[in-house]
Amino acid sequence: MKPAAFRYHAPKTVDEAVALLAEVAPEDGRVLAGGQSLVPTMAFRLAKPGHLVDINGIAALDRLTVTEGKLVIGACVRHAAFARPVCDGPLGKLLTEVVRHIAHYPIRNRGTFCGSLANADPASEWALVLTALDGEVLAKSARGERVIAARDFFQGIMTTALRDDELLVEARLPMLAADTRCGFYEFNRRAGDFALAAAAAAYRVEGGKIVEPRLALGGVESNPRRIAEAERALAGAAPGDKAFRAAADAAAAAADPLEDAITSAEYRRDLVLAVARRALERAAAE
Ligand SMILES: Cc1cc2nc3c(=O)[nH]c(=O)nc-3n(C[C@H](O)[C@H](O)[C@H](O)COP(=O)(O)OP(=O)(O)OC[C@H]3O[C@@H](n4cnc5c(N)ncnc54)[C@H](O)[C@@H]3O)c2cc1C
C-alpha cells in the first residue's frame, strides 16, 4: 500500500523546523527522522500525517559530544553510530553492547537514537538505557525549550511528554564513573525482533559491597522503569549469585507485565527473573 498524500518540508535549521512544526502540528504534521517506524506505519495507513518535517538536512542535529559530564546525542544520530564506543569508559562500552540488539543492520543505519525515544515503543532499548541511567531530553518548540527527565518523558505505550509542536533536539546520558559496572540482557524469539523483556543494570563496588545500584526493565510494562525494590535488594550486598537472585526475585514481584495474544503476563514475569539476573551477572563479569 502507498501512504496517503502529505506535504513534505525540509528545514535546514532547528529554528526553521520548530517554526514549521508550530504551523503544521494542528494538521497532524510529524517529524521525520530515520523513518524506520513512521514510514511503515504510513505505508499501512495506520498513520496519515498531513505534513512531514524532515530533519535529516539539519547538520546541527547530527552531533555526538561530551559536554559537562553528559553524552549529548543529537536528533539525527543513527543507531549505527554506537557500534563503536562513542565515549570513554563504561558508558561507551554499554552502548556498543545494547545497539547490537536493535532491529537489523539496515534499520540501524537509518533509525535514530532520539527517534526511538520519541516513538516510545515499550521495548525500545534506548528508552530503557535513558531510564536506567536517569538521562534527559531537550525539547524545543516555537514557544521555547524545556528539559524533560526520562522518568517524566515516557508516559505509556508509544506515548511521551512531547507536545505535537515540539522537536526532540537531543538526548543526554550521564557519563559513568570509570569503576561503574554495567550489564544488559534481552530476550526475544528471533534476532532483531523487539524484546519480550530486557534489563539494564549498573552499580559500583566499594569495600566489597554494591553501591549506587540501578536496575531497569524494558519491554515488560508500558514503558521502561527503574525497579526500586530490586535496587534495594542490591544496595550494600556483596555482588554475587545470592544478591542477583534476590534482586531478580524482587524485580519479578514488582513488575506489572503487559499481556498480548502471544505472551502472557506470567511468562513475561518469568522472563524478568532471567533477564534481570543475567544483566547483573554481565555487569559483574565486566
Ligand atoms: C523490522 C523492524 C524491527 C525493529 N526492531 C527494533 C528493536 O528491536 N528495538 C528498537 O528500539 N527499535 C526497533 N525498530 C524501530 C527502529 O529502531 C526505529 O528506528 C525507531 O523506533 C524510530 O527511529 P526513527 O529515527 O526511524 O524515527 P521515525 O520513524 O522517523 O519516527 C518515529 C516517530 O517519532 C517521531 N520523531 C522522530 N524523531 C523525532 C524528534 N527528533 N522529535 C520529535 N519527534 C520525533 C516521528 O514523528 C514519529 O512519530 C524496528 C523497526 C523495524 C522496521
Image (cartoon, grey):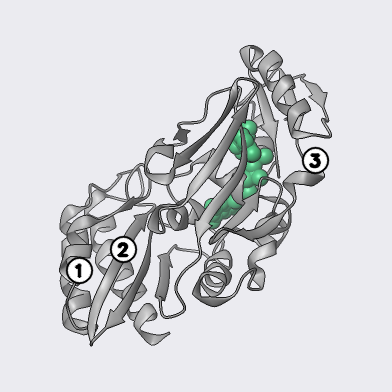
Residue 247 disc label: 1
How busy is the neighbourhood of tag 1: few (under 14 within 10 Å), some, or many (20 plus)?
Answer: many
From this view, report whether residue 173 is shown above or below residue 38.
below
Judge: label 3 CB < 8 Å from ligand 1: no
Report the side of 60 relative to 261 (left or right). right
Q: Position of residue 271 (x, y in %)?
A: 29, 63
Callout 3 crowding tier (Cα within 10 Å): few <14, some 14–19, many ≥20: some
Q: Is residue 123 visible?
A: yes
Q: Quadrant of the C terminus?
A: bottom left
Disc 2 residue crowd, few under 14, some 14–19, many 20+, Cα 10 Å? many
Q: Nearer the viewer, residue 6 or 154?
A: 154
Decide if residue 271 is on the left or right side of residue 36.
left
User: What amino acid does circle 3 point to?
Assistant: Ile
Nearer-the-camera pick, 103 or 214: 214
| Front one among 227 and 179 | 179
Identify the image quadrant of residue 260. Answer: top left
Rendered residue at 69%/25% (across/down):
18
- Looking at the picture, how far across and down is residue 152, in whole percent? 38, 38
Q: CA distance from mark 3 to mark 2?
A: 35 Å
Along the polypeptide, which appears first: circle 1 or circle 2? 2
Disc 2 target residue: 215
Q: Amino acid at mark 1?
A: Ala
Mark 1 CB lies closer than 8 A to ligand 1: no
Residue under numbered circle 3: 58
